[in-house]
Image (spheres, rainbow, N blue to C red):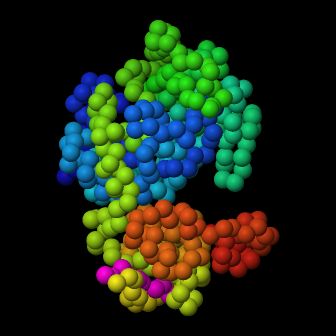
Amino acid sequence: MTTINYEQHPCFNPRVKGQFGRVHLPVAPKCNVQCNYCNRKYDCVNESRPGVTSTVLSPEQAVVYMDKVLEAEPRITVAGIAGPGDPFANPEETLGTMRLLRQQYPDLILCLATNGLGLKPEYVEEIAEIGVSHVTVTINAVDPEITRHVYRWVRDGTRALQGKKGAELLLERQLSAIRALKAAGVVVKANCIVLPGINDTHIVDVAKKMAELGVDLFNAMAMYPTPETPFESLGEPDAIYMAQIRKACERYLPQMRHCTRCRADAVGLLGEDRSSEFHGCLVACSRSAVPKHQIDRPYVAVTSMEGLLVNQHLGESQTLQIWQQTDTGFAFVEERNAPTPGQGFERWKQLAGILKDCRAVLTSGIGTTPRRILVKSGIMPVETNSFIEMALQAVYAGEDVSKLKPKRQKSECGGGKTTVSAGCRGDGTGCG
């Protein structure tokens, strides 16, 4: 029987910060907001601030890295994702990593840090199901007139919003996400970056609102001035000022006073970060080909009309080709029948069972529902219009498969969409 000791989370329990550590797995490169205090171009192995990482891992590579981290530092009790972008601007990578970790390490505390914009209700349900017990939401204001000065833009899908409209959307999503997290029984910490002259006199209002929502812990963080950002000249709030703010906020919520403003690839105890020491290991894992936990999933499924190109939408495929890697390249193994159309959700559950020995499926297009079900089953969907062997090479080598994603064509779709994917039949049923 699995027993997780949640008291061993050093960020939420200062009493154990010198006994237990955490690792941040950098699997989420994309971000959906542009903060005026953030510049992710800068990366030094000796620099400790959010948004910085030496490299990005795939979910499978993250588990390999986790193996090596635990071998070298057994005091690690928490695995989290905090970027370098936002976990829910990269939901497939984030949730895929969390599921793999839960399968491999049932006793591990799982943790996420997000701005809340992309944390949809279905993702809250999924992280609760996986057993992600702690989530941090960065919320810098509860007044859109203040929020609008913190961000250059907010991106919702393909929409980029600026000014008050972007601020209102962000705040609405953040509050909704926090309510959903608390309803799901997740422990929530609110991070609030103290920005002199922007929101510093508003921090107590944020803490009060967070208390009303049932947030468990509040972390007022001093801004870290970063070169080539609009806020680079604001200056960092000093320790005395931060102490005053935290004392005022403490009337409403317990305060986190031991935050170390961790990198997106932080590893070790909070006061003894070992990111630079693990740098070589992290980079090596980002180049690893076949994670050991995937040995029992040796195959890749492909939707193809002629066996040369990935050129068929998953929803239209009556059969799937099964391929494997060999000592001399890649070989076709067999063809498997896809489940009968018209079964809705059940069809994709059946497909996940049919492909249970496959680590990925290559397709020219895939809908939201089948994507979620396959990811949930540990099967990585890869959209591409490339040659089969080119895509297979990327998957088996653990390379960034996002570069394979086909370009969307702008057109009017009978299903009500203006952006359609390969395989769209004009009635919306083939749109990915």
Direction from residue 116 to residue 417 in the image, left or right: right
Q: How far across and how far down the image is residue 2, in percent?
A: 22, 50
Direction from residue 297 to residue 243 in the image, left or right: right
Q: Residue at x 53, y 45 (%)?
A: 85
Q: Is residue 220 magenta?
A: no
Which quadrant of the figure has residue 344? bottom right
Q: Residue at x 43, y 70 (%)?
A: 395
Q: How far across and how far down the image is residue 234, in percent?
A: 61, 19
In the image, which residues are magenta?
317-327
Q: Residue at x 73, y 43 (%)?
A: 161
Direction from residue 383 to residue 59 in the image, left or right: left
Image mark count: 0
Q: How far across and how far down the image is residue 83, in percent?
A: 48, 44
Q: Determine whether 99 is above or below 340 in the image.
A: above
Q: Determine whether 64 is above or below 370 in the image.
A: above
Direction from residue 427 to residue 212 in the image, left or right: left
Q: Foreground residue, 296 or 35?
A: 35
Q: Foreground residue, 372 or 297?
A: 297
Q: Foreground residue, 114 or 217?
A: 114
Q: Foreground residue, 420 or 183?
A: 420
Q: Quadrant of the C terminus?
A: bottom right
Q: Residue at x 26, y 41 (%)?
A: 77
Q: Is residue 107 visible?
A: no
Q: Determine whether 335 is above or below 300 in the image.
A: below
Q: Residue furthest right?
A: 412
Q: Is residue 103 visible?
A: yes
Q: Determine whether 5 is above or below 96 in the image.
A: above
Magenta-colored segment: predominant secondary structure: strand
